[in-house]
Image (cartoon, grey):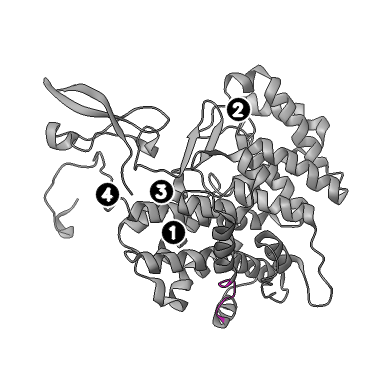
Amino acid sequence: MQSKMKQAGHARIEVEGKSVELPLMEGTDGPKVIDVRKLYAQAGVFTLDPGYTSTGSCESQITFIDGDEGRLLHRGYPIDQLAENSGFLEVAYLLLRGELPSQSQFTAFEQSITRHTMLHEQIDRFFEGFRRDSHPMALLTSAVAALSAFYPDAMDIEDPEQRNLATLRMIAKMPTLAARVYKYSIGQPFVYPDNSLSYAENFLRMCFSVPAERYAPNPVLTRAMDRIFILHADHEQNASTSTVRLAGSSGAHPYAAIAAGVASLWGPSHGGANEAALNMLREIGTPDRVGEYVKKAQDPDDSFRLMGFGHRVYKNYDPRAKVMQQTAKEVLDELGVNDPVLEVAQKLEKIALEDDYFVERKLYPNVDFYSGVILNAIGFPTEMFTVLFALARTVGWLAQLNEMIEDPSQRIGRPRQIYTGPDQRDFIPVRDRG
């Protein structure tokens, strides 16, 4: 990857009477950055930034987020335009290759994914080693890592051809793995992929069809699933993406790097947020109790937290939430569901957009607020939500991993620390310790 950063001046800092000049850089969009790579060499000091909230860990040409304006772009294209007009595999091509495909390019890409949807038959027996009540993310994390044992011909992270093969395999096999995880957890037989169906359609069939009945795809649910995949495909340098990059920076093979991303996504503050939001809506129960819970959220002495509101990056309305809101209405109308959870969500959203407490703190609904309602209506248990998130985000992880490997400026990740433990001291044998 050729750098596209431009120098925009210099920044000078004073360190114990010594003036240090550092380059001021800028990208296509977003704030300028101070390049601190030579700070330690020039001034003998590090920077401290817990959580990396003010630190750019890399240069990337994939995704841009403007949190203040509520914008999300993939390779320059707004997320709402992609969700409305394209399909998940087209967005996957965009993230991986940098441009939207021509018809012939898309056909070839779609066919290359389709050829890899099957799993090695022994992987099915791999699941039998887990308890039926294991958390689905435990199964998925292990299954993704296990792919390396079944496909050792695509392990060299430095070889572009092997990386491409591993990329195609993982995008193709993640729906099959995720469906296996679901079927195993409910005790139903595994369903083999049907390559005549679309990506989302095939996934829903593998999850919800049974041998005893004919499966009829529902275009509204298929489109909703495809949109959910698009909206979760990539989101800049979040915790799981940074984990994938960090793991890959050591030279770890692609299956290991993606498995690390799955494990990171498992956390309730990251991939589990939509599950937490749905559980909160269920706890509120009915629209008439929304006011009570809003007061609890505003009480600093109450431990209750509103889930699905606010975002680490967005200080405006999450652009993905707007698409998800409309999708939720379409799904529930199609299924004829009068879900009190949705009524609670709609009333809570209305209050949050008008109440000074939420407006002043910029606590707008995020993508997790409605995605849980949709997935629940389709028929997925809450424990599966993060698995579906991982399925979609695999594309973004792979795009980020490939970009990092091709970036000549990248080195093995090695954050520094501020040590605050004991000063050097001498060892005392146990018999002489008081």
Instruction: Give the amino acid type for the residue marked by disc 3 in the picture.
Output: Ser
- Image position, residue 60 (x, y; %): 39, 43
- Work out whether residue 30 or residue 141 is closer to the camera in this orientation and state it: 30
- Horizontal side, residue 398 vs residue 56: left or right: right
Question: Quick one: label 2 or label 3, which is nearer the N terminus?
Answer: 3
Distance from the alpha carbon under mark 2 to that under mark 3: 25 Å
Question: Quick one: label 3 or label 4, which is nearer the N terminus?
Answer: 3
Q: Main secondary structure of the magenta part?
A: loop
Secondary element at tag 3: helix
- Image position, residue 25 (x, y; %): 29, 30
Instruction: Give the amino acid type for the residue marked by disc 1 in the picture.
Output: Ala
Distance from the alpha carbon under mark 3 to that under mark 4: 13 Å
- The disc at residue 260 is 1
Q: Which residues are magenta?
A: 115-120
Residue carrying label 2 = 363
Distance from the alpha carbon under mark 3 to that under mark 1: 10 Å
Query: Can residue 264 be seen here?
Result: no
- Work out whether residue 298 or residue 6 is closer to the camera in this orientation and state it: 6
Say if 352 sits above or below 284 in the image: above
Instruction: Give the amino acid type for the residue marked by disc 2 in the picture.
Output: Leu
